[in-house]
Amino acid sequence: MGGDWAPAVYPYDRLMQEAAFIAYHFHWPLHQVLSLEHADRRRWAEEISRINERMNEESGTLLEV
């Protein structure tokens, strides 16, 4: 054992971008979004992006995180 291992830390700015993106689109409160596991939060952000891509193909407007 030993060594200087430290857990990876997700960048705060990126976390807030994802949280705002999900909260905006799903109208979820911030505490609910922040309580999601990292992988689940990323998955929701990716799914919202896919939905936006499909809905905005014709208008050329995309919202992505």
Image: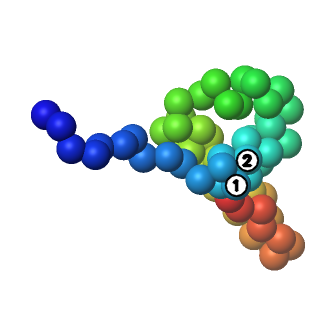
Numbered label attached to residue 16 = 2
Q: Is residue 55 above or below residue 45?
A: below
Is residue 65 among the parts visible in the rendering?
Answer: yes
| Residue appearing at x 52%, y 37% in the figure | 38
| Residue appearing at x 50%, y 46% in the figure | 9
| Residue appearing at x 54%, y 48% in the figure | 10
Q: Is residue 26 above or below residue 32?
A: below
Query: How many residues crowd around disc 1 within 10 Å: few (fewer than 14), some, or many (20 or more)?
Result: few
Query: How many residues crowd around disc 2 within 10 Å: few (fewer than 14), some, or many (20 or more)?
Result: some
| Of 60 and 11, the residue lying toward us | 11
Query: Is there CB contact under 8 Å for labels 1 and 2?
Result: yes
Residue with the most extreme left position: 1
| Of 17 and 7, the residue lying toward us | 7
Q: Is residue 57 above or below residue 44?
A: below
Q: Of the residues shown, which amino acid type is indicated by label 1?
A: Asp
Is residue 25 among the parts visible in the rendering?
Answer: no
Instruction: Give x and y (percent) for residue 13.
Output: 70, 55
Secondary structure of residue under mark 2: helix
